[in-house]
Image: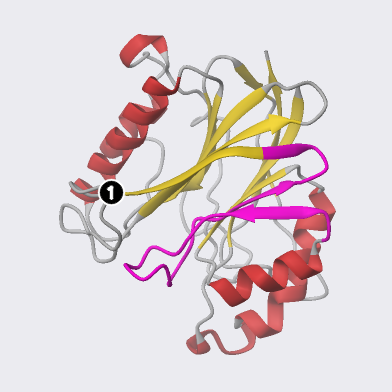
Amino acid sequence: MRLRVMTFNLRCENDVDGENSWRNRRDAAAAAVREVCPQVVCTQEGFAHMLSYLLEALPGYSMVGRGRDADGGGEHSAIFFRSDRFEATAVDTFWLSSEPGVPGSRGWGAGLPRICTWCRLTSRETGETVRVYNAHLDHRSEEARRRSVEMIAEHVAAAREPCIVCGDFNAEPEAVEMKPLCSRASFRGGRGLLGCTDLNRGTFHGFTGTSLHAGPIDYILATPEVTVSERRVLDYPFGGKWPSDHFPVWADATIS
């Protein structure tokens, strides 16, 4: 089974962004997705109204996910997928905290609640499956990022099916907290993830068009059953607008 995957931090709607606020660049965000034509899009920082706009602007996609706040509101780590290609046969969200089943919980000094949403996508044509994880890690606490990475790695290790892990991890590949995902040494059960070193440029640009970090903080990673070709960065504006303060990243994957 082949599929194209994109990870895309949308940048939440924030009036301090002025001309780069969501209402001024939402068409550019939708255009970026149409440019790549992915079958799966993992988004971060989307609020419900932002995601509803994208669903209207991108016919043919369905979406799973919920807000990170206790009441279901706030930022989502939503996963879009082509509903003509896939059916979501399992969906869940867990909080990146010591109480992963408690909505709105925060962990290990994190500034905000953080979540990971995952779904099992089943091919309507062949019945093959792939599990997709999508997370947005904390921007303040290194310990929160490290513990969150460990938690995600544990989930992937227990999945026993091909997995793709996407997200904004707010850490470059060499950061100590990224080792459970970026090390080529396998973790539990030989379920190591590959793909951290495929990008040699930063993915956060702050609406400048120039990478502000030497390395990426946005990732598309995969278990060994998934062969992912070179990760690519979408690093140009659409209609004179940057889609986000992050460059979207996309890659083609083959599930064996």
Q: In which quarter of the image is residue 190?
A: top left
User: Residue at the location (20% across, 49% down)?
Assistant: 99
Residue at horizontal 29 percent and vertical 36 percent from the top = 151
Instruction: Give the quarter of the figure containing the C terminus.
Output: top right
Is residue 106 visible in the rendered structure shown here?
Answer: yes
- Dominant SS in magenta: loop
Is the residue 183 above or below the residue 210 in the image? Answer: above
> Callout 1: helix, strand or loop?
loop
Q: Tell me where the magenta segment starts and ends, as one range.
A: 59-87
Side of 82 relative to 110 (left or right): right
Residue at 56 percent across and 45 percent down: it is: 201
Residue type at numbered disc 1: Gly
Residue situated furthest top in the rendering: 190
Up the image or down, 198 lies above or below 50; here it is above
Q: How crowded is mark 1: few (under 14 residues within 10 Å), some or many (20 or more)?
A: few
x, y percentage for residue 17? 53, 84
Q: Position of residue 192 (x, y in %)?
A: 42, 18
Task: Residue 180 in the image: state x and y as whole percent.
Answer: 32, 28
Which is nearer the eye, 60 or 124?
124
Q: x, y percentage for residue 244?
A: 61, 67
The residue beneath circle 1 is: 101
Q: Is residue 201 left or right of residue 238?
A: left
User: Is residue 227 highlighted in magenta?
Assistant: no
Using the image as rendered, state which of residue 5 and residue 184 is in the foreground. Answer: 5
Residue positioned 28% across, 47% down in the render: 145
Residue 237 appearing in the image: no
**Residue 186 quadrant:** top left
- Tag count: 1
Magenta-colored stretch includes residue 77: yes
